[in-house]
């Protein structure tokens, strides 16, 4: 549910971001896509390779 809220905010503020940075709406859209993908990949990596998690069968 949080992703929908963040996506809505990004879409709402794309024109203002583009105007402030003096870039096209397409460039602002691509920046938003890059942001979302990089956030997803970093979250996935931290879930897969977290040094703080241990499999349950090795806790004995």
Image (cartoon, rainbow, N blue to C red):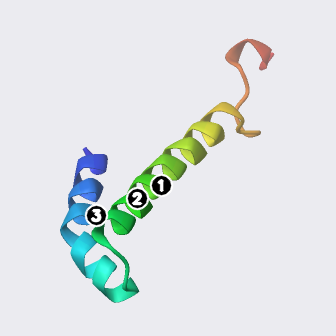
Whether the residues at callouts 2 and 1 have beta carbons within 8 Å, the answer is yes
Quarter of the picture containing the N terminus is top left
User: Which residue is at the front of the view, 37 or 49?
Assistant: 37
Which residue is identified by label 2? 30
Element under disc 2: helix
In the image, what residue occupies the spot 49% across and 44% down?
Answer: 40
Q: In which image quadrant can residue 15 be found?
A: bottom left
Q: Name the residue: 43% across, 63% down.
A: 31
State whether residue 17 is above or below residue 55. below
Q: Secondary structure at mark 1?
A: helix
CA gap, disc 2 and disc 3: 11 Å
Front: mark 2 or 1: 2
| Left/right of residue 38 with respect to residue 5 in the rendered view | right
- Residue 8: x and y in percent read 20, 58
Q: Using the image, tell me which numbered label, if any, was put on residue 10.
A: 3
Q: CA distance from mark 1 to mark 3?
A: 12 Å
Task: Name the residue carrying label 1.
Answer: 34
Q: Position of residue 26 (x, y in %)?
A: 32, 63
Mark 2 → mark 1, Cα distance in angstroms: 6 Å
Is residue 52 positioned above or below 26 on the image?
above
Label 2: how many Cα within 10 Å (few below 14, some 14–19, many 20+): few
| Mark 3 neighbour class, 10 Å CA radius: few under 14, some 14 to 19, many 20 or more | some
- Between circles 1 and 3, the one closer to the viewer is 1
Q: Does label 1 or label 3 sit earlier along the sequence?
A: 3
**22 to 53, vertically: above or below:** below
Report whether 12 appears left or right of 58: left
């Amino acid at each position: 549910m949080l992703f929908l809220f963040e996506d809505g905010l990004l879409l709402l503020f794309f024109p203002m971001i583009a105007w402030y940075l003096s870039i096209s709406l397409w460039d602002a859209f691509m920046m938003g896509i890059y942001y979302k993908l990089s956030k997803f990949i970093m979250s996935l990596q931290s879930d897969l390779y977290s040094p703080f998690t241990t499999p349950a069968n090795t806790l004995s």
